[in-house]
Image (cartoon, rainbow, N blue to C red):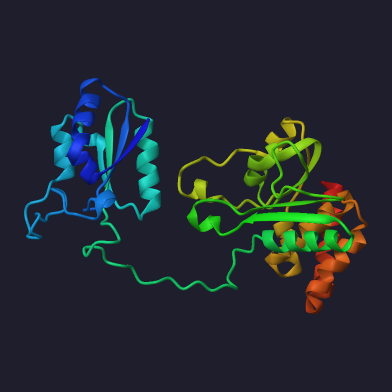
Amino acid sequence: MIAVIGDSTFLHMGMQGLLDIVYNRGNVTVLLLDNRAVGMTGGQSNPGSGLDIHGQETPKVDFPKLVESLGVKPERIHEVNPYELPTLFKALRDEVKVNDTSVIITNQPCVLIDEYGAKPPLTVVADKCTGCSNCLAVESLSQTALLQGYDVKKTEVAGMAQRGGVVTSHVRFGPRVLSLAIPPGEADILVGFEPAEALRWSTHLRPGGVAMVNRLRQEPPGVTLGLFDYPDDPVGEMRRLGIEVHAFDAGAIARDLGNLRLVNTVMLGAISDYLPFPAEILKDTILARKPKLVKINEQAFEAGREAQAMA
């Protein structure tokens, strides 16, 4: 069990609760957010901020010593910088596995108080994308379906990788489509640009649905942050679930062609024979998007068709 409490609330009424947890040998990890301010009522000082009600400096509460005085064992007390996510997540993972009371104290000030020191702004270069190709594949597929007279709906969750999540997209087309998102158990085709993520989303496939999976392993943020272990054999696990899986290394194909971003074209070629319109129509749409890259995109598309046939 994890409990989350701010520093001022802890000083107001959380100390009694922690004392009771320790006394009753509770298996609880307390995440104590020391942000040096009373956030919920206007940012006033508290005994943990080091300033009195007149704004004068005064000795501030030492939270590690305070929670130790309430009975928490020293080895179960951790003070971490919450901006260092791998360290924070590791502390959380380690402590929830221990059958004891533990406290993790985050020690950075609220961004709205004077003590906060803003970090230098980050510059994002738009053309330096990760090359996951999700957005390009979705756009090409949606445009092709529209040109064939289908009602098309798509939804994307982009940019989540920077916040510990993944990039996903749903494309639905037919005579009439009302909902953007595909419910679990209703997808006809799953295009997985990474094996573990394909396994994660395999529950969205309908019985008899097909999964096209790029075998190129790229550890999701949850794995690199230490939150989860990478599955031993995600493709094999999908097959054990009875899913028809066509898995191949689209990354290697794209690299051989000279550009890793061709993965999206390779994967579109792989699914082209499972769509309700000829593969040539989808290919023509892709080629029209980048006139200067017609030859290499055509090679990638056909390589994808060949790879899925042999997978």
Instruction: Please report the residue visible at 84 percent of the width from the left and 61 percent of the height from the top.
Output: 146
Instruction: Please report the residue visible at 63 percent of the width from the left and 44 percent of the height from the top.
Output: 196
Is 162 in front, or is 223?
162
Q: Examine the rendering and report whether any part of residue 133 can be seen.
A: no
Side of 110 where 259 appears, left or right: right
Is 103 in front, or is 299?
103
* Quadrant of res 108: bottom left
Instruction: Please report the residue visible at 16 percent of the width from the left and 49 percent of the height from the top.
Output: 48
Q: In this view, does 158 lie above or below 212?
A: below
Instruction: Please report the residue visible at 50 percent of the width from the left and 40 percent of the height from the top.
Output: 228
Q: Examine the rendering and report whether any part of residue 83 can be seen.
A: yes
Q: Which residue lies furthest to the top in this view?
A: 24
Is 150 in front, or is 84?
150
Residue 127 is situated, as x and y percent measured from the top left of the image, at 60, 73
Side of 163 where 152 appears, left or right: right
Residue 255 is situated, as x and y percent measured from the top left of the image, at 71, 64
Q: Residue furthest bottom?
A: 292
Specify the quadrant that holds the N terminus: top left
* Quadrant of res 284: bottom right
Residue 142 is situated, as x and y percent measured from the top left of the image, at 78, 59
Side of 145 where 228 appears, left or right: left
